[in-house]
Image (tube, rainbow, N blue to C red):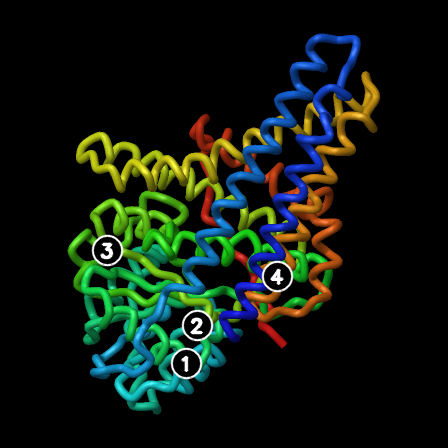
Amino acid sequence: MKKSFTSAITIVTITIICSLLVIIFYLNIPDNWQFNNPYANFVAKLMLYYLLFIFVRTFLLLILSFLEVIFYKKSRDIVKYPLVTLIIPAYNEEKVLKKAIESVLEIDYPNLEVLVVDDGSTDDTFFVAKEMEKHSQVRVIHQSNAGKSKALNYGISEALGDYFVCMDADSVLSKNLLIEAIPYFERDENLAAVAGAVQVGNANNLLTIFQKLEYIIGLNFHKKAQSFLNMVTIVPGPIGVFDRSKVYAIGGYSSDTFAEDSDLSMRLLMEGYNIKYCDKITATTEAPDEINALITQRYRWSRGMVQAIFKGMNLLWDNFSVRGALVITYMFFETILIPLINFSFIMLTLEFALLYNIVDLMGPYFVGLTLLDVALCFYSIIMERQVFSLLILSFLNRLTYGLLLEVIRFFSIFDELLKIPMKWGVLERKGMN
């Protein structure tokens, strides 16, 4: 993509967001939000200023994303071809494992080993993996069931490569993965990891299509902005390339949270290492196609991230650093504070609908948020080279799928604060067509 075209798209998106700010604030909407009840007036203005905060936050993220696209120039040619170990932790993945290994063997890189870690599977996962050892690059090891984090650490300890890639057993990686990622490490000696873009491979019903939209706006867009500061806060489980020595130095993955990828990324950043994002490398993964499965997955993700943040706060207390404080503060706002505020306003919306004139208050508020979603969707579709049909869903997302996610996040946060016991929650693999 030509950078002049990228610049034009970004300028258009910035203009849209600035226009929304002008419409909301310079048309004197606050004066029109007048109710007989002082409480209603107070809440109305809170909602307005929160909307301002969301616009400013998004505007800053958009600028950082734009700067990353325009100014980051990595060398295209690899100077050396260091050995890279690709680690696949697998627990009861017989339906999808073979396809994942086959995709890895097609990666365009001359010095690669594939290490499958069977985490005590009770199905034929181990035998499927052993059959793939007919390829000289594939090696299979086994451990008694101990969880994904320990399986990954076992793989890291057995890996022969200077760098390693972690992927999920249901994912298919892009062939250019290492050709694109390794130059990042050659450019920056302090780089600990390169995060890739996650794509939904089974977008065949409305729920999975909404997840596809969520991935390019809610996840990949944020990573591109964070990458300009060398501070990507989550290297996703399905696709991440790591410097093995740096991960080993901080003790590898931890099993005391339900979001081992978020926990590892935060600890690497707090140790002073850099993490970048590259949207040219992708992992196509299987998304939950049923509501119950989605709730199980997102509840675990959200609780795990809250656990990682509290853990990071304790680490910061023992060893303070400005960078660590920035990471924790950003994650606290994005993962805890904003979801809590969003859910609170949802409840207030219901109250206002019953007691007050809902049109005067909720019209500007939800129109503003919806138009913001559409603007970001437009920008992300261009940047991530996605189909424009997703733009239609962005008009509906705020009051449908997005609302569901806010409810899940809210209850996961409070459940974690109350220390309510939970299990990992294993999703049934159906395979991608």
For the residues bearing labels 3 and 1, Cβ distance under 8 angstroms: no
Looking at the picture, how far across and down is residue 92, in whole percent?
A: 46, 66
Q: Residue 281 bears which disc, if any?
A: 2
Q: Amino acid at mark 4?
A: Lys
Nearer mark to the viewer, of 3 and 1:
1
Q: Assign a secondary structure to mark 3.
A: loop
The image quarter in which residue 147 lies: bottom left
What's the residue at 29%, 36% (across, down)? 325
For the residues bearing labels 1 and 2, Cβ distance under 8 angstroms: yes
Nearer mark to the viewer, of 2 and 4:
2
Q: Amino acid at mark 3?
A: Gly
Whichever of labels 4 and 1 marks the residue nearer the N terminus, that label is 1
Whether residue 91 is visible: no
Q: Residue beneath label 4, please? A: 212
What's the residue at 42%, 38% (across, down)? 306
What's the residue at 65%, 49% (across, down)? 16
Q: Residue beneath label 3, please? A: 252
Looking at the picture, how far across and down is residue 409, in whole percent?
A: 55, 38
- Up-down relation of residue 308 to residue 224 (above or below): above
Looking at the picture, how far across and down is residue 414, in whole percent?
A: 50, 29
Q: Assign a secondary structure to mark 4.
A: helix
Q: Is residue 314 rendered to the left or right of residue 32?
A: left
Q: Residue beneath label 1, please? A: 176
For the residues bearing labels 3 and 4, Cβ distance under 8 angstroms: no
Q: Amino acid at mark 2?
A: Ile
